[in-house]
Image (tube, grey):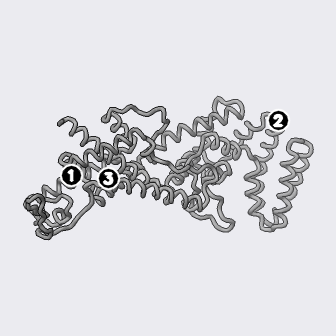
């Protein structure tokens, strides 16, 4: 009998921790949606990989990646404001985007053309570059177009010196890339040439190390994918630690706001068999129907991000899940929440001929006993016990719903329902 009561108390506490953990996870998801935490963390990790600011901008705005929205024509807003709702980036997409950028010999040339002051001249030169791209496979035509491009650039020597110098710097790498394209193994040689053109020694050393031993474009992409995965595995722990700390903070705030005191709750469960039975029934039903307490994660945005409407919808879904979990917690009629009663303020009650006098100084849920030092001789002990109970709750909740759900299965003697295929994930 005593053993079953102990088990029921444990089951009751664990089930409460599961619901609170779910609520914390859903609140975390809501915060992450509103503050764009996942996408900002991904952007920072990718930036650390690439070193060079111009290369970062090209990769982050690449259509396959889409972490950053392209800058406005007349302004370049802060990157935090431009970060799209892209929460994950597959290694193969990163490798394709980086290879595409490194192997494109025309990017720097097009960028240099934006410095030409005369729009008509700039448009004419863009047409020449387009002709070069269209005829790059024909050496004779490519040489003729390159010669024409040289002549157009030479015309700027006297009229637009800054644009002339910007464009002339791109001609050497462009000619080398054109020769690589015409030589056969063009894609791979273009990537190597693109690496050498990045004006950042740290990135060059990193890529030379990554690409050492590769002999073709496919091997280069696979090497970059492996490099990306290794780097992501080293840096993604930062986000995990951030969310763990957030879970601890949100759990503590919930415990304080709702007055969910683990010590008081355990004591109440021990003395109230009806409450124990109610929680045991709910907990056993949760084990049998595991999907009822599974965390429902909103869909993660892929490349291109989410629209404003999608972001609002995701935040609304997280809020609704949190609201439903909170209502389920209240339906259990737990001894939680705060009261504020002065000694002698509650009337006497008569039950079965016995006069019951409410003693405000002995009520652990009475805020008067915590905030008023002279409320009782045991005031300091009451405060210490209350803080201990709240801290225990916050640390327990920070362990996550999957942890406590597994504990519940073990304590209740139920096996994991592998046939359901249901899994829970701590946000």
Q: Is residue 221 above or below residue 374?
A: above
Q: Quadrant of the N terminus?
A: top left
Say above or below: 48 vs 357. Answer: above
- Quadrant in which residue 93 is drawn: top right
Looking at the image, tell me whether mark 2 or mark 1 is earlier in sequence order.
2
The crowd level at tag 2 (other Cα within 10 Å; few <14, some 14-19, many 20+) is: few
Report the residue marked by disc 1. 264
Question: Which residue ends up furthest to the front in the rendered image?
Answer: 352
* Image point (10%, 66%), residue name: 374
Which of label 3 and label 1 is nearer to you?
A: 3
Q: Which mark is residue 326?
A: none
Indicate the position of residue 397 as horizontal and vertical percent values: 33, 48
**Residue 56 in the image, given as x and y percentages of width and height:** 61, 51
Residue 153 visible in the shown view: no
Horizontal relation, residue 420 to residue 333: left or right: right
Residue at point 82%, 35% (across, down): 183
Q: Quadrant of residue 345?
A: bottom left
Nearest to the eye among marks 2 and 1: give it: 1
| N-term-proximal mark, 2 vs 3 | 2
Pointer 3: what residue? 332
162 or 104: nearer the viewer: 104
Q: Which residue is mark 2?
A: 183
Q: Position of residue 34 (x, y in %)?
A: 49, 60
Q: Nearer the viewer, residue 236 or 220?
A: 236
- Say if residue 207 shows up in the picture: yes
Counting from the top left corner in percent of width and height, residue 165 is at 75, 58
């Amino acid at each position: 009998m005593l053993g079953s009561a102990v088990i029921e108390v444990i089951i009751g506490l664990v089930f409460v921790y599961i619901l609170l953990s779910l609520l914390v996870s859903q609140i975390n998801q809501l915060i992450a949606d509103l503050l764009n935490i996942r996408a900002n963390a991904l952007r920072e990790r990718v930036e650390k990989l690439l070193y060079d600011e111009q290369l970062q901008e090209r990769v982050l705005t690449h259509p396959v990646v889409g972490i950053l929205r392209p800058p406005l024509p007349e302004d370049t807003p802060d990157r935090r404001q431009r970060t799209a709702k892209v929460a994950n980036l597959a290694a193969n997409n990163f490798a394709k985007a980086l290879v595409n950028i490194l192997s494109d010999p025309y990017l720097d040339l097009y960028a240099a053309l934006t410095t030409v002051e005369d729009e008509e001249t700039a448009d004419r030169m863009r047409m020449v570059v387009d002709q070069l791209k269209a005829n790059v496979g024909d050496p004779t035509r490519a040489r003729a177009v390159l010669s024409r491009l040289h002549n157009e650039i030479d015309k700027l020597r006297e009229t637009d010196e800054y644009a002339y110098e910007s464009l002339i710097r791109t001609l050497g790498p462009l000619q080398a890339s054109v020769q690589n394209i015409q030589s056969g193994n063009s894609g791979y040689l273009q990537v190597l040439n693109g690496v050498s053109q990045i004006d950042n020694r740290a990135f060059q050393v990193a890529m030379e190390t990554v690409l050492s031993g590769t002999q073709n474009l496919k091997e280069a992409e696979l090497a970059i994918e492996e490099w990306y995965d290794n780097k992501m595995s080293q840096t993604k722990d930062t986000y995990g630690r951030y969310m763990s700390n957030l879970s601890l903070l949100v759990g503590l705030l919930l415990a304080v706001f709702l007055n969910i005191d683990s010590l008081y709750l355990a004591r109440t469960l021990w003395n109230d068999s009806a409450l124990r039975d109610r929680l045991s029934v709910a907990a056993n039903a949760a084990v049998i129907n595991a999907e009822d307490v599974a965390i429902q994660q909103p869909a993660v945005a892929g490349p291109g991000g989410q629209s404003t409407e999608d972001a609002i919808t995701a935040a609304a879904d997280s809020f609704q899940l949190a609201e439903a979990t909170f209502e389920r917690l209240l339906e259990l009629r737990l001894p939680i929440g705060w009261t504020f009663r002065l000694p002698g303020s509650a009337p006497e009650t008569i039950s079965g001929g016995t006069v019951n006098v409410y003693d405000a100084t002995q009520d652990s849920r009475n805020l008067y006993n915590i905030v008023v030092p002279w409320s009782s001789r045991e005031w300091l002990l009451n405060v210490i016990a209350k803080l201990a109970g709240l801290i225990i709750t916050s640390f327990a909740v920070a362990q996550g719903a999957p942890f406590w759900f597994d504990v519940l299965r073990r304590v209740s003697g139920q096996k994991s329902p592998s046939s359901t295929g249901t899994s829970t994930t701590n946000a």
